[in-house]
Amino acid sequence: MTWWYWMFLGLALLGGELLTPGGFYILFFGLAALMIGTLGGLGIVTTDWLQWLLFSLLSVVSLLFFRGRVLEWAKRGEPAVEEVDSLVGEVAVLLEDIAPHALGKAELRGSTWSARNSGAAALAKGQRARVDRVQGLTLWLIPE
């Protein structure tokens, strides 16, 4: 294939990478095409089968070895993921009696939740209880 076909393909693939949401897959295929175009333009690699073989090898090897590093570098500027909204410490109202370590229902922020009594004493319907921890969609409650 003519060297400038490889250059065009490489630039098109790099442009395609800009249109995709941050996976950094197409980038390595575009860079490999640009390398093959450069080698073809310098007359180092002239046969089509060798160009395609080198393109495949360069693409896959660079993808396997460098994608993780590129992802780490790209995420370096992002702030650490923090828990935006935590229910721990909030006060829920019990919708039914809950024996110690038993499961029941409670209302918190206008929604009904599964609730587990993590205390040693029974919780009564209508009582206010504090959220000790959240496990999945279950609130672990202690008496307030």
Image (cartoon, rainbow, N blue to C red):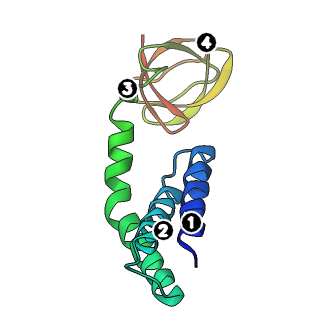
Give the spatial CA distance, label 1 vs label 2.
Answer: 6 Å
- Is mark 4 in CB contact (under 8 Å) with mark 3? no
* Mark 2: few/some/many CA within 10 Å (<14, 14-19, 20+): many
Give the spatial CA distance, label 4 vs label 2.
Answer: 74 Å
Compared to 55, does 50 lie above or below?
Answer: below
Query: Which mark sits nearer the N-terminus, 4 or 1?
Result: 1
Name the quadrant of the C terminus.
top left
Query: Which mark sits nearer the N-terminus, 4 or 3?
Result: 3
In this view, the residue in front, 143 or 110, is 110
- At x 35%, y 27%, the residue is 120
The amino acid marked with disc number 4 is Gly
Residue 37 badge: 2
Q: Which residue is mark 4?
A: 126
Instruction: Report helix, strand or loop for mark 3.
Output: loop
In this view, the residue in front, 91 or 11, is 11
Instruction: Report helix, strand or loop for mark 4.
Output: loop
- Is mark 2 in CB contact (under 8 Å) with mark 3? no
* Mark 1: few/some/many CA within 10 Å (<14, 14-19, 20+): some
The amino acid marked with disc number 3 is Pro
Query: Which mark sits nearer the N-terminus, 2 or 3?
Result: 2
Picture quadrant where residue 54 is located: bottom left
Query: Which mark sits nearer the N-terminus, 3 or 1?
Result: 1
* Mark 4: few/some/many CA within 10 Å (<14, 14-19, 20+): some
In this picture, residue 13 sits left or right of residue 82: right
Q: Which residue is mark 1?
A: 4
- Is mark 1 in CB contact (under 8 Å) with mark 2? yes
In this picture, residue 55 sits left or right of residue 126: left
- Is mark 4 in CB contact (under 8 Å) with mark 1? no
